[in-house]
Amino acid sequence: MGIKRKTKSLNSLLEIFEQSDEALSAIDLVERLNSKMNKTTVYRILERLVDEGVIHAFKGKEGVQWYARCKDCTASNHTDLHPHFQCRDCGKTECLDLQLSMPKVSNHRIDSAEMLLVGQCEDCLA
């Protein structure tokens, strides 16, 4: 982790990610942290953590922004190129452990791609 300066607010947000194996929505994070910091601070810290390669962001259903821990990313290279799954019934959202390869497109440089699979999770299927 390349974080240079850890504040109390940053530590609160990092603690939430360390305790979760699932992706977390921006809405959920703002609600969880509303007694410790304002919404603007939450978004500012999330942006910083994405820039530093600590977490990655992706859009879920209805355009909601989701965040999940990175595995081996750095500030200059996000290596977590994988699809995400969101359950249409319970809302559970997770990173799928499937590596994708980025297609080569002549005369273009592709920096990122997003794939969201929507369906029913194991619990909702049962």
Image (cartoon, rainbow, N blue to C red):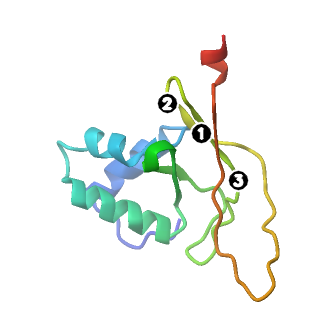
112 or 48: which is nearer to us? 112
Total label count? 3
Instruction: Return the x and y of residue 111 as percentages of the image width and height.
Output: 65, 75
Instruction: Return the x and y of residue 22 as percentages of the image width and height.
Output: 54, 38
Q: Which residue is mark 2?
A: 91
- Cβ atoms at labels 1 and 2 below 8 Å apart: no
Q: Is residue 41 above or below residue 87?
A: below
119 or 102: which is nearer to us? 119
* Picture quadrant of residue 4: bottom left
- Cβ atoms at labels 2 and 3 below 8 Å apart: no
Residue 74's disc number: none
- Amino acid type at circle 2 is Gly
96 or 86: which is nearer to us? 86
- Amino acid type at circle 3 is His
Between circles 1 and 2, the one closer to the viewer is 2
- Please tell me which residue is depicted at 54% across the width and 29% down the height of the picture: 88
- Please tell me which residue is depicted at 41% across the width and 43% down the height of the picture: 16
Residue 94's disc number: 1
Residue 82's disc number: 3
**Label 2 vs 3, first from the N-terminus:** 3
Question: Disc 2 on helix, strand or loop?
Answer: loop
6 or 25: which is nearer to us? 25
- Amino acid type at circle 1 is Glu
Instruction: Return the x and y of residue 11 as percentages of the image width and height.
Output: 35, 54
How many C-alpha atoms fall within 10 Å of the one at disc 3: few (<14), some, or many (≥20)?
Answer: some
As measured in the structure, the alpha-carbon distance from the residue carrying label 1 to the one carrying label 3 is 11 Å
- Cβ atoms at labels 1 and 3 below 8 Å apart: no
Question: Disc 3 on helix, strand or loop?
Answer: loop
Q: Is residue 1 above or below residue 20?
A: below
